[in-house]
Amino acid sequence: MRKEVLISGFGGQGVILASVILGRAAAVYEGLYAVQTQSYGPESRGGASKAEVVISDEPIDYPKTLRPDYAVFLSQEAYQKYLTHLKEGAILIIEKDLIPHRNEEVEKKLKLKVYALPLTKIAEETTGLSLTMNILALGLFVALTEIVSREAIEKAVLDAVPKGTEQINLKALHKGFELGEKALKGEL
Amino acid sequence: MKYPFPVGKSDFIQGDEAIARAAILAGCRFYAGYPITPASEIFEAMALYMPLVDGVSIQMEDELASIAAVIGASWVGTKAMTATSGPGFSLMMENLGYAIMTETPIVVVDVQRSGPSTGQPTLAAQGDVMQAIWGTHGDHSLIVLTPATVQEAFDMTIRAFNLAEKYRTPVILLTDAEVGHMREKVDIPNPEDVELVYRKLPANEEEAKYPFGDIHGDLIPPMPIFGKGYRTYVTGLTHDEKGRPKTVDAEIHRKLIERIVNKIEKNKKDIIEYETFDLDDAEVAIISYGIVARSAIRAVKMLRSEGIKAGLLKLNVVWPFDFEMIEKIAEQVNAIYVPEMNLGQVYHLVKEGANGKARVELIPKIGGEVHTPQEIVKAVKRCEKCI
C-alpha cells in the first residue's frame, strides 16, 4: 500500500510542519513506514513551498512522489504547477479563496475528487488564528483519506506544536475532522 | 546516564539529526564544526545535546580548525566527530591526511551537495566520492560509508565510530543533502544494546614506547592517550615505530605506509558491507550506493515486471572496494549499470573491477535531483536494445 501525498503552498502557511506531522503520525503512531521530504530553498515567508510524504506498510524504496494519490494545494501557483502530476482519481484539497482559477478540464480528465474550501477563513473563525489553517487542513485530510487514524494524527500534532498552543491546535484539527465528515456525507 | 532524546523507541527525524543522535550513542563526546548547508542540522543537534551529556560542541573559525580540533580531542582519548559539506570537506583534506598519517580515529561526515566550489548548497549530489577516497595527497587508505536511508545514516554513524576505533583510522560517512534533510522512521536502540568498540590502549609502558609499531602483528598499534603518563610524539612526517621523524629512510617510509594501507585493505572482508536484490539470476546488474540505490531497487522491480532479469548490488561501503566481487558479477551478467549523481566516479571503480568481463554503463545525473526509477529503467532499456 504505497500512498503518495503532495502538500504545496507558500512559505509561512505551515506546509512543511503539516507534512512532518503526517509523516510522524504514520511512522511513530501507526507503525507504518513514512518518508517526508521538502523543497528546501532560501524561501521562507512568501516563497513557494512544497513537501512530500510517502507512506507505506513496507520499506519505502524511492522516497519521492511519482504520481500523488493525495494532494493539498494552498496557493494558485501550487495548483498550476502540480495539478497535472496527480494520479487519476486522486483526492485533492484546495484553499478555495487562494485558488480562484481552476482548470476543470484537467480535474475532470484525471477524475479528481476535489474538496475546495476557504480553509484560512474557517481556521480564523474557528480558533481566531489564521495560522492554524495547516492543522485544520490536516484534520480534513485525515477525515477524507483515513490514511492514519484520528488518534495518531492527534498525538503527532501534540508532539509538534509549541507548548501552550495544544488546545487551539486540537480545536483546528477537530474542525477539520468535522468538515471531512460533512464532505463525505455530501453536506458541504 | 540520561540521554537528551528518547531511546529504545522509534522517532521520525531528519538524517542529519539521526547522525547526531547516533554519534552520541556511539560515545562521541567532542564535536567541532563550522556551519554549512546541508550539514548544519548535525551541528545544531550537537550544540544542543553535547552539554547535556558532559560533552563539548564548539564552533571553530573554519573547517581546517574543526578537523584539527577533532584530531586533538581523539588524542586525549575522546571519540570525536566533525561534519561538513563539499566546500568545507575540501578545506579538511590536508588534516584528513594528517589523521591518516598519525592513525587517529575520527569520524568525518560529508553531507554532499552539488559542486565544485559552493555549487548548489541546498541540493544533493554524489560528487565527492573520489575526493573522500583520494582527496588528500599521498598513498593511503581509509574507510568510506554510504547510507541510503535515515535508519542507515543512524546505524552507519555508530559503525563509523566502531571502525575508526578498531582500525585507528579516519572514517568518512559520505551522505548527501537528500538523506540529510529527509525525515524517516528511525528505531533508536536502548544504549545498552548498542555494541561499542574502543581503541586498543598500550598494556604497559613498554608497549607505549611503540605508538606506531605493529607490536601485536595485526597492523594496528595500541594508541597511547595524552595525559595518561606516556610521552608520545605525533607527527605528520614519516616516522618510525616510536613516532620519531625519519624523513629520508625509504625503508621506514615503505613499512609505515604499507602498514597504514594494509590495515584497511587486508581487513576488507570485515569492513565491506553490501546488500543484493534479485542479483542471483540477474542478466543485468545495477550497482548503486546512497540515495540513488533506493531508486535502483524500484527500477529493478520495474525491469523485472517487463521481463528484463535485473538485479541490484547496493554498496554500503565504497572504500575499501571489493574489485573481485565486481568481477564475479561481471562474469555472470551481460551488462552492469552504475547510476550515480555525478558524471562518473564509482563507475570507474566498477569498470576496473569488471575487468572487461561485462559492459559497464554509467547513468549520470547532476543538478540536484535524485534519479527517478523511470530514468534508470529507460537508460537500461535503451542500452539493452542497442546490443
Image (cartoon, coloured by chain):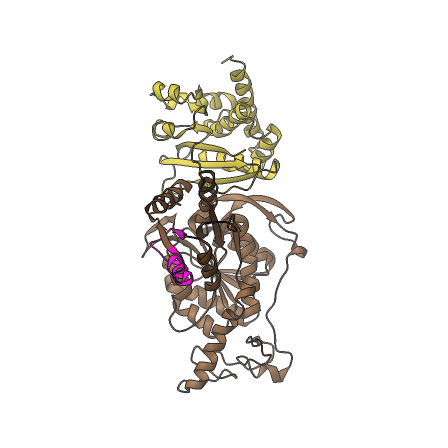
Q: Residue at (62%, 47%) from the top-left corner?
A: B6
Quarter-of-image position of residue A104: top left
Residue A127 percent across, percent down from the top left: 52, 24
Residue B351 appears in the figure:
yes
Residue B341 percent across, percent down from the top left: 38, 51
In this rendering, is residue B133 above or below A112?
A: below
Q: Residue at (58%, 29%) from the top-left corner?
A: A167
Residue B249 percent across, percent down from the top left: 42, 87
Residue A171 percent across, percent down from the top left: 56, 25
- In this rendered view, identify the residue nearer to me: B286 or A139: B286
Residue positioned most to the bottom: B249
Label the yellow chain with its letter.
A
Residue B61 appears in the figure:
no
Give the position of the N terminus of chain B as an image quadrant: bottom right
Q: How many marks?
A: 0
In this rendering, is residue A21 above or below B325?
A: above
Magenta-colored stretch includes residue B166: no
Instruction: For chain B, give the colour.
Output: brown
In this rendering, is residue B121 above or below A103?
A: below
- In this rendered view, identify the residue nearer to me: A55 or B326: B326
Q: Residue at (40%, 23%) from the top-left corner?
A: A110
Q: Is residue B196 left or right of residue B31?
A: right
- In this rendered view, identify the residue nearer to me: B241 or B226: B241
Magenta-colored stretch includes residue B357: yes
- In this rendered view, identify the residue nearer to me: A30 or A105: A105
Residue positioned most to the top: A187
Magenta stretch bounds: B335-359
